[in-house]
Amino acid sequence: GAGVSQSPSNKVTEKGKDVELRCDPISGHTALYWYRQRLGQGLEFLIYFQGNSAPDKSGLPSDRFSAERTGESVSTLTIQRTQQEDSAVYLCASSPQINYGYTFGSGTRLTVV
Amino acid sequence: KQEVTQIPAALSVPEGENLVLNCSFTDSAIYNLQWFRQDPGKGLTSLLLIQSSQREQTSGRLNASLDKSSGRSTLYIAASQPGDSATYLCAVPSDSWGKFQFGAGTQVVVTP
């Protein structure tokens, strides 16, 4: 596609429910990154994928968070048993190759009530 | 560990003035540096990407310089407009795989 697409744009969920966030990168971009931005805070790295290499999961805050990506296509970020502290904007970015700069999607605003 | 600092944290100027935003980083062994703009409640829009071999990049009223040896980059915005009001973020790779470390941003307000 023309840009990085994220869905849903907004998600309100009850505490304890699972949520799944989707990122569709720019076609041909081998690298895909997930970041989290809490209200008034900076960007916090979560996970990144590069081609078929093992993902770098070093930023995932707990085992409630997981992400998948098949090849160089869509990625899903799953948060299990959501907590209020998970409320944030989740941003996805893709890059044609490593060290080539990012293009971000518009983000998913997650609110846990 | 790469650390990125942006000064000032906030800036308010009248329309027409030039803006100077600073970014410093601790590890000078970077492949590139990228400047972004973020509007409230929105994602990040890429403004300029400077490769390590470059000293500056220009796009319209925007000019970004890079001094790797001193660990600094400066974003200049000429003849500011109210539409330039946003938060500006700089980012540098924190590892050899291109994972970016972001600064906390400079919040800019341009008053008419």
Image (spheres, helix red, strand yellow):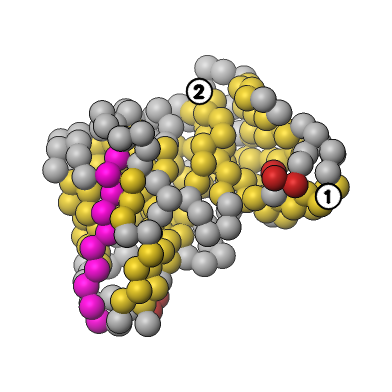
The chain identifier of the residue carrying mark 2 reads B
The quarter of the displayed image where residue B75 is located: top right
Residue A34 falls left or right of residue A28: right
Badge count: 2
The image shows residue A17 at horizontal and vertical percentages of: 23, 78
* Residue with the most extreme top position: B53
Magenta-tinted stretch: A16-25
The image shows residue B47 at horizontal and vertical percentages of: 56, 34
Residue B89 falls left or right of residue B99: right
Q: Does the magenta run of residues contain B104?
A: no
Q: Are marks 1 and 2 on the same chain?
A: yes
Pick the residue in front: A38 or A10. Answer: A10
Q: Which mark is residue A110?
A: none
Q: Which mark is residue B51?
A: 2
User: Which residue is at 76% across, 41% downward?
Assistant: B81
The chain identifier of the residue carrying mark 1 reads B
Q: Does the magenta run of residues contain A20?
A: yes
The quarter of the displayed image where residue A63 is located: bottom left
Amino acid type assigned to the residue bearing label 2 in the image: Gln
Which residue is identified by label 1?
B112
Q: Are marks 1 and 2 in contact (CB under 8 Å)?
A: no
Secondary structure beneath dot 1 equals: loop
